[in-house]
Image: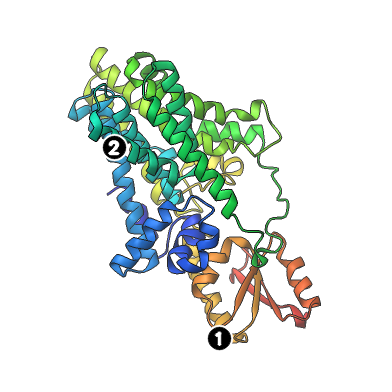
Amino acid sequence: MLRMVPELAAYPYPMGYDVINYYIPVVAHFEQHWPVAASQFPLYVIILHFVNLATGLSAHSVVTATAIIMFGVFGSSVFYIARSLLKLGVGYSVFLAVFVIIQMAVLRTAWDLHRDIFALATMMLAFCLVSRKDIGWKGLAALLALSSLTVAADRMIGALFCMSLAAYAIAARRAVLPAVFSTGLFSALMIASYAAAPGIEPNAAGASAAASFEFYNPQNLLILFAVINGLLVVLAAIGLMHMKNAALLLKIPLVISLAGSFSWLAFPDTALFVADRWIIIAGIFLAIFAGYGIIHLIRNLKVKPAVAGSVLAAFAAVGLAYAVIPHDSPFVLYAAARASIENFGPVTMQFNALDIEDNDEILSTIAEINEDTEPDAVIVGEKHWRGFMEMYLEGQRTYRFSNDPQVLAEALDNKGEHAYLLKFNPNSPDLFVIEDVCRR
């Protein structure tokens, strides 16, 4: 139900950058995109493709419905973690699951990192099986299946899962077989993904040029960590101190993700360690410990449940605000830090390649292009709009994108190709302007 709320607010437009630029185009034109998708841990898009074939629904409907279901599976996996690993009762387990799924780190991941949500869910379920002492051959088979799904779904979560299992096997002297199996499979998939990786696509001329990473600096990363995780740190510390040793399987990925979050301390000038992604993953595990910290206060310090309910309601209000508030007027916490965090992720979920409220403008502009340009016209613009263009350009029109569309359009013109330059003017009543390069 929670995951449906932002989708309903965005209806009828898709929500999420990767949704409009990756998931929907890949599902709609699977064979065309397969050479590229095959090199990017394609398990999740394969699932989407089969759902699309089985149901006959539109690509948009399949991607959205599956994302909602996977969010439910993730919430259930957190509930199962609480019941199995943390030994909580049903009521406290429900509380923990709800507390986790309303956090910004989880909602930001659910915004467009759908395969991350899938991989996190299978990882949580695998952790529950790893923690069992007498797992049996059926449990082992289920564990290996969940491990396979986790490492095959996403490169980053798969790496975290393998490192966590390896560390647990060394520390607890258990789960050696799942650790070896997962690491071996992940290594094979990494090799296969690099072998399948295509060269630079002609359509993306200039898109892989060195981009400006001025925003990727220690100050902005620290602000991002404070915004996403600042409210959780104290409660998470309480939960961490009082959680039993059975939670080692949760403590290990927390430590790994925190190390990744602060990798900029050792390597301040590189974005290769994707500290922003680790900050979000750390936030998910911090939320589990923070929720447990609240439960500890309720049970041991005789804090009234009404107080805990008020805390949950406050976090829920912030989470719902992040989910549904328009992109141009975000919640005050995110608005204050907008200049520092916006390049790492949206300040509200009501965004894809554009503010949801501006989607009408780009669709009407594409309709104008279809009507006023020749059937084989070349349209040049920013890479962020490629999903819209692929889905709605008609005829033999092609879309070329670049970090510098003006330069690419002029280069095509010099080669004798008739190109049209698409410009974005946020301060103009007409957000998009089509310029005929040949007639300038």
Please identify the quadrant where the C terminus is shown: bottom right
Mark 1 → mark 2, Cα distance in angstroms:
57 Å
- What residue is disc 2 on? 141
Question: Mark 1 Cα within 10 Å, few/some/many (few <14, many 20+)?
Answer: few
First reached walking from the N terminus: tag 1 or tag 2 = 2
Say which residue appears at 53% left-offset and 32% top-offset: 225
Q: Of 157 and 266, which appears nearest the observer?
A: 157
Q: Of 338 and 15, which appears nearest the observer?
A: 15
Label 2 element class: helix
Q: Total marks drawn?
A: 2
Q: Of 115 and 262, which appears nearest the observer?
A: 115
Q: Quadrant of residue 147?
A: top left
Numbered disc in front, either 1 or 2: 2
Three-letter residue code for mark 1: Glu
Residue 287: x %, y % from top left = 39, 30
Residue 197: x %, y % from top left = 59, 54
Asked if residue 202 lies left or right of residue 21, the reply is: right
Can residue 49 be seen here? yes
**Label at residue 155:** none
Label 1 element class: helix
Q: Is residue 221 above or below residue 326?
A: above
Say which residue appears at 78% left-offset and 72% top-offset: 410
Question: Mark 2 Cα within 10 Å, few/some/many (few <14, many 20+)?
Answer: few
Most extreme residue toward the right is 414
Say which residue appears at 42% left-offset and 50% top-offset: 114
Q: Is residue 26 above or below residue 4?
A: below
Most extreme residue toward the left is 90
Three-letter residue code for mark 2: Ala
Residue 60: x %, y % from top left = 39, 64
Asked if residue 24 lies left or right of residue 296, the reply is: right
- What residue is disc 1 on? 371
